[in-house]
Amino acid sequence: MAYGAGTTQLTFTVWSYSNDVILDNIKKFEAKNPGIKVTMQDFSWEKYTDVMTARFVGKTPTDVAYSSDHWLQQWAAANWIVPLEDPFPQVKAYKPDFAQYANEGMTYKGKLYGLPYYADTIIFIYNEDMLKRAGFSAPPASWDEVTRMALAMKEKKIVEYPIMFQFQDITPWYIEVFLSMVYSFKDYRMFDDALNPIFDRNGSAAHKVAQWLVDGMRTHKIINPASLETTEIPLVKAMGAGQVAFAVLPKYNLADLNTPGAHAQAGKFKMALMPGETHGTVGFVRFYAMTKMAADRGRDVQSAAWKFLEYFGGKTDGQFTVVRRWALEKGLGFAQLPLYKDPQIRGAINKWGNVTLEEQQAKLAKAKEALTPFWGSWSLEFQKEMNRALLGQKPALDALKASAAKWKEMKK
Amino acid sequence: MTRRAWARGAGTLLGLVVACYILAPFGWVALSSIQPEKELFRVPPQWIPRVVTTDNYRFIFTGRFPAGYQETGLLRGRISEKARDALPALRNSTIVAVTVALLNLVLGTMAAYTFARIRFRGAGALYMFILASRLLPPMAVAIPYYLIVSRLGLLDRYSALVLIHAAFTLPFTVWFLTLYFRRVPPDIEEAALVDGATRLQALLRIVAPVAAPAVAATAAFAFMFSYNDFPFALFVTSTIRSQTIPVIVSVTAVNPDVSFGVVAVTVVLTMIPPVLFAMIFRNYITRGLIAVTTTR
Amino acid sequence: MTAHPAPRARSGEARYAYATVLPVVALIALFTIYPIGSAVVTSLREVVLYRPESTPFVGLKNYAAVIRSEYFASAWRHTLTFAAGAVPLATVAGFAIAHLLNARTRTASLLNVAILLPWAIPTVISGIIWAWIFNSSYGAFNGALYSLGLVDSYVPWLSRPTTALLSVLFAHVWKEVPLTSILYLAALQAIPEELFDAARADGAGALAALRHVTVPLLIPTTLIIVVYETMIAIVTFDLLYVMTGGGPAGATSLISYYMYNSMFTSFNFGHGAALAVLLAASLVIFIVLYMRLLRSEEIYRE
C-alpha cells in the first residue's frame, strides 16, 4: 500500500484485549485525520513487558504504546518513553479532570507521561446471595466483620472457604491487592519520604493486613489455601461458579462476573467499599505513552502522535469519546471524573455495578507509593515472602522484615 | 497357560492405565470444547456432559457469540475475540513448520551426505561447530535472535520464524543423518560414481530411497519443533500476519474475558496438524530411530 | 555394522562439498556466533536497562554476583530436585511403556497411536491444560479423585511446595514419555529374537529374561535417554512458568526462571547474560558426555 506524500505512519503497540474495538477506534481516528495512518501490533498481556523490552532494546519502530503505572519508572528511566508536557504543554489542562491516583500514576519526576487508556480501583466484591443466606443484610465494613461473616458462612456450610485471593507467586495483582487492603487503614504509609521501608514495624497497617491474612488462612480457615496458586482469571471463574463469597479484585471483573452467559452465579455480585477505617484502596492506571523513537522522528510525527493520544485518551469535540466507549461497552473504569455525570454511563454501570459507590471509591483511591525501577522485582520477592508466611514457614512480621531487607538491598 | 493369561490381563490393564494417563487431558479438553462456559466449573465435573453445544466452535469459525453472552444494555458479550485468530494462526504455524521441515529435508540431507562421504578441508571443524551450536537456552537467545531478525528487516514475517527454526533444527538433522549415512555401505554409490554419476545424482538415486525412513524422521522432528515453538514466535511476531498458534492460544487463555470452552476449541484445533503429521510419519519415525540407534 | 569413514575428496568434489555444507553452516553461524558473542560481551559489562547512561566493563563481577546470590543456590537446588524426579520417572516410564507398545495386542495398537499426542502439542499449551486440570477449585484431577471417592474435598495441589513439585513432575513426565518410550521401543525391537529364545531354552522366566537379556542390551539407550532428559530438565521453563509461576513461595523456581527474571523483571542484562553463559557451560558438559556415550555405544555394538 503506497502512502501519499504527507502521510504520517504511526505504529501503536497494545496488549490483546478487545482488538476489534481498538481497530474500530483506529479506523474512526483515521477518518477524522486523513494524513495519519496507524498500524496496530498486539501481544499477550502476560508477555507484554517482555516483548516491549525486546522492541525498545532493538529499537523496532514504535510510536505510541500502552503502558502502566507500575512500569512507568523503568520505561522512563530507560529513556524509552518521553514526558508529554514538554512537547505538548496543553496536556496539563487535562490534569484536573483526572482522578488523583491516575495523575500520580502517570507522573515521573514531576512530568506527565501519558493520557489514560483506562483506570480502575481495586474493590471488595461479594456474593449477595451467600451473604443473605448467612443471615447478614449489609456487606462488611471492617476486616473484623469480614472474618465474622466468613466464619458464619463456613459454619452454615454455605461455602467451605468463603474468601479467596489471587496470591500466586508471580501475579502482578498480588501486591496491588495487599496494598489496597493496607490503604484501608488510617496509618497506611509503607515507606517514609526517603523511600525507606516502615511497613515492617510491629503494628503497622501492613503488619495488621499480613497477620489478618495468615490468621484467615491458618487459624480460622476462611481463606482458601488454593489462593497460593490462583491468578486473576481462575479466581473470577471460581467466584462465578459459586465457590467464593468475598474477593478483592479490580473493578472491571464485576462487570464480567455479572455477565449471564459466563458464570453460573451471574447477577448476584455486588461491590462494597473496601472494608477498613478509611475505605481507601489502590487505584491504577493504564495509559498511552509516546516513545522516544517517535519524538526523535521529528515535529510531524510528534504532532500526529499527539493527535492520536488526544483522540484516544483525551477529548474529541468536548467528549472523552474513546474512554466513554470502553466504559459503556466493556465496563472498564476511567480516570476522567466528569464522565461520572454522564447519564448514559451511570445507567450502563448500574446494570452490573453501583455507580455511586464506584465514584466514592475512586475518590478514596490512592496511587501505589514508592514506585521505583526495581519495584517490579521487589514486589515478586515480597509476594514470595508473604507466601512463606501463609504456608506457615515463618511468622507474618518476619516475612515483612525479610521484604524490607530486600528493599534496602535493591535500593543501593 | 493361566500364567500367560494373567500376564496378558495385567498387560492390558497396564496398557489401559497408561492410555488413560496419555489421553485423559485431551479427552478433558475435547469434552470442554463442546460445553457452554457455565458447565465447565461444576464441582464435581459433569463427566458425561449435561448440555452439549457447538456454540464454541461456531464462535471460532463464524464469530457468532455463544448463547448466553447476550448484550447487557450496551455491554457487549464479554468474550475474547482474539480466539478467532486461531484459524489464521493455524495456517501460519503449518506453513512455517512445513517449510522448516522441507529445509531440513533438502539442506540437512545434502550436508549430512557430504560429511559422511567426502573428506574435505575443515570438515571436522565444521561438523563440531554444527553440533556445538545448541548450547544457549531459548530464553537467553530470544533477544539476540530478535535483534538479528530485526536488523534483517524480517520482523513479523514467516521468514523470521523459518530462519530461526531451521537454525535450531538443522544441527540435529545433520548429526542424525550423518550417523545414518555412515552406516550405509558405499559400494553401490562408488560403482555409480565410477560410471560417471555425480555425487548429487548418487545421493538422489541411490542413497535417498534407502535412507527415506531416517530422512523422514528428521523432517518430522523439525516439523514438531517448529510447530511447537513458543519463545521465539512470541518475540518476533507482532500481528496475526505471522503469529503462530501457540502464541494465540496463550494470549487467549490470559484475556480477562476468556471463555475456557473457546480456549478448549483452540487447543483441539492446535492438535490437528501435528497429530495428522505424526500419524502419517509414525512408522518412519520409529524406523528412523531404530536405524540410527541400533544394529540392523 | 561398521561406520564407513569418508574417503579422500576427489577432484572437483571439494567444491560440491563446500557448496552443500556452507549454507547450513552459515545459517547456523548467524544464529550462534552473534548470540554467544553478545552473551559473553554483555556478561562482562554492567548492563541495567533503566540505567542506560553507563554500561562499564566490570570483568567477572556479574558472575560473582549471580553465583553468590541466594537465588543461584536455591534455583540449582530446585533444578536438581526436579531433575532427580523427572529423569528417573521419564526413563522408567518410557521403559515400561515401550514393553507395552511392543506387544501384539489391540491395546498396544491404540497406545502406539496415542503415545505421540503429548509430543505433538506445544509445551506452553500443555502447561495451560495441566494447570486447568490440577486447579483446586474446578480441576478435573480433583474432580476424578472426588468422584471416585478417594478424597472428600478438593486438594490444593499447586499451593503446597511438595504437591506442587509432584504435579509439575506429573505433567512434565507426560510430555517426555512419548520420546523416551519410542526410543526404548526402537531399541527393544532391535534385540534379536534368538536371544530371548535362548534364554527361554535355558529355563528363564519373563523377569529373568528381562534382567539378563533386555536390560543389559538397553544400557546404551538408557544412558542416552538419561543424559538427554537431564538436559531437558535443566532448561525447562514454559511448563513450570505456566503451572506454578515458580511457586508456591519459590518452591518450583528453577535456574531457567532465575535467568528469565534477571533479564525481564530486574532488567539486569549483565546478570542474565552471565547466567546464560554459566548455563551453557553446564550444558556443554552434558553434550560432551552425550557425544562420548554415543560413540561408546557405537563401539559397544561393534
Image: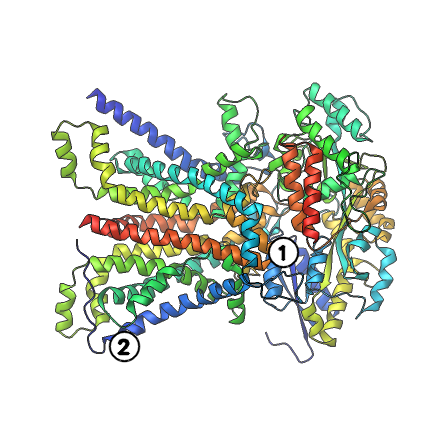
* Amino acid type, callout 1: Thr
* Amino acid type, callout 2: Arg
List the residue tagged with mark 2: C15
Quadrant holding the N terminus of chain B: top left
Q: Where is residue A314 in the image (x, y as percent from the top left)?
A: 80, 61
Q: Residue furthest bottom?
A: A5
Q: Residue C157 carries which label?
A: none
Left or right: residue C136 compared with residue C208:
right
Q: Where is residue A271 in the image (x, y as percent from the top left)?
A: 78, 37
In this view, the residue in front, B117 or A67, is B117
Vertical placement of residue C34 versus A187, above or below: below
Vertical placement of residue B221 versus A123, above or below: below
**Neighbourhood count class around disc 2 (C-alpha, 10 Å): few under 14, some 14–19, many 20 upward:** few
List the residue tagged with mark 1: A49
Q: Position of residue A79 (x, y in %)?
A: 69, 65
Tag 2, which chain?
C
Q: Is mark 1 on a helix, strand or loop?
A: helix
Between the residue at mark 2 and the residue at mark 1, the CA separation in whole angstroms equals 48 Å
Tag 1, which chain?
A
Residue A43 image-quadrant placement = bottom right
Left or right: residue A222 compared with residue C188:
right
Q: Where is residue B11 in the image (x, y as percent from the top left)?
A: 29, 29
Residue B85 in sight: no
Residue C116 image-quadrant placement = top left
